[in-house]
Amino acid sequence: MQPCCRICLDLNPFIEENERWTIGVRDGCVEYVMGFVVDQLEISAGNGCPTCSAIWSGLKLLTSSHSIFPAIASTPQRGRFILQEECPLEIELMQGANGDSEIYPPVRIQYYTAAGDPKQPAFGGAREVPPELSLPRCSSIIFEWIEDCEKNHEACVATTSETLTGESALPRRLIDAGRERALNVSLVDSHDVNVAEHLKYATLSHCWGRSHIIQTTKETLEERKKCIRWSSLPRTFQDAISIVRSLNIQFIWIDSLCIIQDDAEDWKNESVRMATIYSNGYINLAATSASDSRGGCLSSRSIKRISGNLNVEPVRVNPSTIPAIFARLSFDSVHHRYRAGKIQKSDLPDALSVPLLSRAWAFQERHLAPRTVHFHPTEMIMECKTSLICECTGLSKLVTQYKRHSVDKTVENNNKTFNSWLTVVEEYSRLKLTRESDRLPALIGVATDFQRQLKSDYLAGIWSGDFARGLLWDVTRPTERLQQGNPKRHHRLQIPRWSWASLSLDTEGVGIYFPAYYNETFTVDEHLAYISTNLPVVAANIIPADLDAAIWVKGLVVTAIGFPSTQDPAIAKDITILFDQDLDEEVLITVTEMNLDATCGWTGLLDISDCASTVMCLLIGGIIEGDWDSEDEKATYSCSLVLEVEGHEAANMEEQSYKRIGVLDIRDGDALFRDAPELTLKLT
């Protein structure tokens, strides 16, 4: 028996001498990691270790053919072996003289055997991703994915079985893609289509961008019905139509052509029906890598790096032995974006190459569609209501418990559906909108889908059945507060301040989150109750522009004094809250700090007046946390909504309006609220 290689340990983390391997979890997947020195890897390869030899060969070949390291960076000196069960081997190389990841992000290389070849214990299997995506390959893979989805995914089958039938199942208009190689297409009215025979249609998600895009207007409507010349269609539309033809789908819905763009009434009617349009589609094609309609779907493949776009083509590292082992740049950054749903600094180059994933409207389209195929610049990826799968097969091995946070028709527990909604809002709040006025409209379709399941009133982004947790939203704070932009309020929009949608979150890394969702000890205070609203409670209905939107809630209320913090604004919270409570013959003073939802900057200019101001704290619920002073003790916190009088003070409290300025967790707050009055407040 050959002795174990001292450099790679034969890529076996379970041997006796395994103290060099560390175990961790990334995106829900267990991985084993071990560091190495590049010079020692080269020596080991020269001494005959077959594993080190294959790795070193791949590193040399990729370095010479793909220019994976910038010229200004020195040759990597250190690296890491990364193992995940049944997955290709990943090698991470640190660039720069000191491996400075801030200046030179690590480069990851993947080693694998081709699907169908004999397995190599040290290297997992994967499917080849060609540098160019052809239409036959595209349609073949999509057919394979859809067949598996329809046969094996209960949630996807449940969604499909609930698809409406008849004219109401179709958008008002569709594009008739015609037959393969047809020169032209046309716009058809769904009322004129033989619905029973042609119910199946596709949808397209794409970025409009700044370039001119072909549209249907009142003037061109009749012309579009007669003929839309192929040459007039941008590349993205041409590719999408070619793909649906190859999938034997006759119709496709494209927003710019199927909605009359200069007809406000038509736009309103179709945007409200967005949930139906995407939910009832058979497949959604997402031009994920295209910044506008010229980018296309069937494009050359590349991996985005700071140094530029790099080739995805693999190299064979062992020409004379079997099975063949290949090396290519890792798709890890691509997979991480879909697995985690969030962007890390190391993922930024990839994030910039997929503009569609940062758009709020596209988020809705992905969540509503039964399945979406992404034409990512690196590979094709499909997400359905059950799974994530990609062209190289890596995602299907990593994401075994994937669950898209959309409505699961197989779940009867509303608590799980409410949890899914909070997760949807957290992800959605980080996305971009051209017009901030679309913050709620761009989520109408998803909200409508949830409302069918929840049977709950929709209150400008929260649900009456979960309004306690919904009201306790907060904002993630950038670590470098002085250098970052800060949340601002939509003063021109009629969105109530108690709604998370009232904030403009245009800073990288800033978003909405719901603390009560993450704390299983949270309980709603027994005195808290939702009374009524003047809002339209049907998710599909838009808030009227002239409505002074409000909800009426009942609960325990205490008053306090708020004044600007005098500490360093880079580290301090925005305001100090002082509670003054009479206890028999004593006065109890409680002082705490809180951040405001929105400020005019971190310089003391606040959402309340610069001088001391009276605020009101409405008790929402309570949580239990570990005590900082004692590992064995627990501390209780009262979770409250902090309010300020809206406008001028009214003659009586019943007519007074209150605006939210933030949330506050008060340690040992039971004493503060013990004798508090129970009041009904109007929140605007």
Image (cartoon, rainbow, N blue to C red):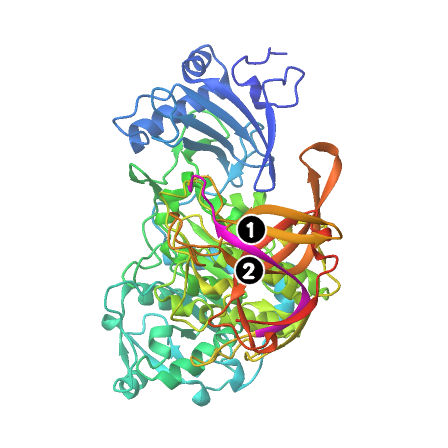
What is the three-letter code of the residue carrying label 1? Ile
Q: Earlier in the sequence, mark 1 or mark 2?
A: 1
| Residue 559 included in the magenta stretch of the image | yes
Which residue is pictured at 35% across the width and 48% down the height? 352
Q: Provide residue 170's location: percent of width, then percent of height.
A: 49, 81
Q: On the image, which quarter does residue 265 sit in?
A: bottom left
Three-letter residue code for mark 2: Val
Res. 385 in view? no
Q: CA distance from mark 1 to mark 2?
A: 9 Å
Side (left or right) of 416 relative to 482 = right
Query: Residue drawn 72% across and 64% down?
Result: 413
**Residue 231 placed where, x, y %?**
23, 71
Q: Are marks 1 and 2 in contact (CB under 8 Å)?
A: yes
Q: Quadrant of residue 488?
A: bottom left
User: Circle 1 is placed at which residue position?
Assistant: 577
Q: Residues within 10 Å of mark 2 (few under 14, many from 20)?
A: many
For mark 2, what is the residue? Answer: 615
Q: Is residue 575 visible?
A: yes
